[in-house]
Image (cartoon, rainbow, N blue to C red):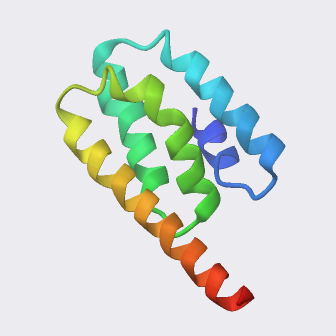
């Protein structure tokens, strides 16, 4: 999974999307403990970097992760909301530059 996590951070959209799809598939085979201790932690790492591609990847991994995240659900919600605010700020900034 570490290699796929790295691929989730690249700028190339096709590579990133395939890494997210592969991780989502892998998540189906994980135990509840592995989901919380490994997979959810990876999603949190991706969502808290400064890299937009990483944050976008974390959104793609939220669905397979959230339903089995146990006690980490609130933390995932918090970081996901922060990503949406961040993207909204980027869009507002871009819109101002275009006007």
Front position in the image: 59 or 72: 59
Q: Residue furthest front?
A: 99
Does 74 sit left or right of 80 as displayed?
A: left
Residue in view at x 38 percent, y 48 percent: 44
Asked if residue 7 is positioned above or below residue 35 in the image, the reply reads below
Asked if residue 96 is positioned above or below residue 7 in the image, the reply reads below
Does 18 sit left or right of 6 as displayed?
A: right
The part of the image, by quadrant, that contains residue 99 is bottom right
Residue in view at x 64 percent, y 34 percent: 20
Residue 8, percent from left and from top: 65, 46
Residue 47, percent from left and from top: 45, 54
Number of numbered discs visible in the structure rendering: 0
Residue in view at x 75 percent, y 32 percent: 18
Does 43 sit left or right of 37 as displayed?
A: right
Front position in the image: 19 or 67: 67
Front position in the image: 8 or 61: 61
Asked if residue 81 is positioned above or below residue 96 in the image, the reply reads above
């Amino acid at each position: 999974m570490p290699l796929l996590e790295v691929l989730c951070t690249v700028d190339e959209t096709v590579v990133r999307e395939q890494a997210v799809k592969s991780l989502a598939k892998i998540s189906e085979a994980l135990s509840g403990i592995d989901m919380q201790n490994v997979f959810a932690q990876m999603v949190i790492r991706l969502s808290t970097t400064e890299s937009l591609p990483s944050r976008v990847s974390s959104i793609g991994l939220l669905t397979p992760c959230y339903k089995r995240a146990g006690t980490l659900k609130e933390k995932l919600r918090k970081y996901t909301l922060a990503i949406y605010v961040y993207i909204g700020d980027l869009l507002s900034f871009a819109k101002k530059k275009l006007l």
